[in-house]
Image (tube, rainbow, N blue to C red):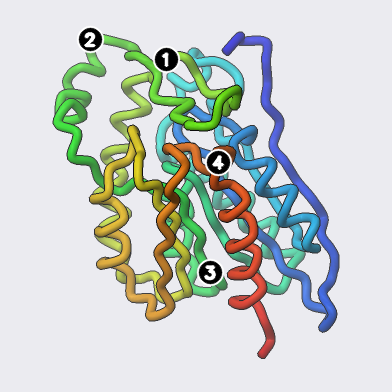
Amino acid sequence: MSADVRIPPYSSEGRAGSAGRRVGVLLSHGFTGSPASMTPWGEYLAAQGYAVEVPRLPGHGTSVQDMLRTRWDDWAAEVERTYAALAARTDAVVVGGLSMGGTLALHLAEQHPEIAGVVLVNAAVASTNRQLLAVPLLKHVVRSMPAIGNDIKKPGVDEAAYDRTPLKPLASMTAAWKRVRADLDRITCPLLLFRSAEDHVVDPSSGRIILGGVSSRDLTERLLTNSYHVATIDNDAEQIYEESAAFVARVTSDG
């Protein structure tokens, strides 16, 4: 991605529901990705009347050089800031995300028990890829490696991800997984997890760890059979949009 290209965040104001209750949804994109992978989902939820925020994480949506200067704490701080602003103008908030965005959503829910629900799409908290074991050492020698973005089955779709994967930011993300896993039991709100049957970036171990680690009693796992990793803009996108909208309506209902 060219350094002079900037992918903006997405934001919608939403409207009050039939009971006068305003509901917000925060959606986070993934590592080396951009709001482009989440905006269609956000637009669908906004059309249902929800106030939606899709922040552009620091170092993303511009250039790999920008991202090299950022780490997990920068991304988590931006999600926290966005959540605080959204929660201040709504009565209930559901958080969600794709890949690392799902990890950030879990981290946010661990810190904020008032969150009404969590929606995850191929969220990552672990990996069986042994190549990642070398990243903490390799990051001191190599700045980046080939891209992990655009794992999409549907032809002609682009998530506007970087063409390289910066290693120091990658190492900070994988180090944060341990912290997120350790606090999963703090999550008690309803959780909806979408998982692609064929995912070339995140393996099934993350889904098992999440479902087994949270304290939520309201848990739903949905298998996506016609999408790869970036399922939010892949063949199963409509399923994600429709089922997440129904989930948001249910978990934020006054009844």
Q: Nearer the viewer, mark 3 or mark 2?
A: 3
Which residue type does callout 3 highlight?
Answer: Gly
The answer to whether 29 appears left or right of 166 in the picture is: right
**Which residue in the structure is indicated by mark 1?**
164
Q: Report the disc number at residue 200.
A: none
| Element at label 4 | loop
Q: CA distance from mark 3 to mark 2?
A: 41 Å
Q: Nearer the viewer, mark 3 or mark 4?
A: 4
**Which residue in the structure is indicated by mark 2?**
141
**Which residue in the structure is indicated by mark 3?**
117
Q: Report the disc number at residue 235.
A: 4
Which residue type does callout 4 highlight?
Answer: Asn
Q: Residues within 10 Å of mark 4 (few under 14, many from 20)?
A: some
Q: Position of residue 5 (x, y in %)?
A: 67, 15
| Element at label 3 | strand
Q: Are the residues flagged by discs 3 and 4 in contact, CB closer than 8 Å? A: no
Q: Are the residues flagged by discs 2 and 4 in contact, CB closer than 8 Å? A: no
| Mark 3 vs 4, N-terminal side | 3
| Mark 3 vs 2, N-terminal side | 3
Q: Nearer the viewer, mark 2 or mark 1?
A: 1
Q: Are the residues flagged by discs 2 and 1 in contact, CB closer than 8 Å? A: no
Q: CA distance from mark 2 to mark 4?
A: 38 Å
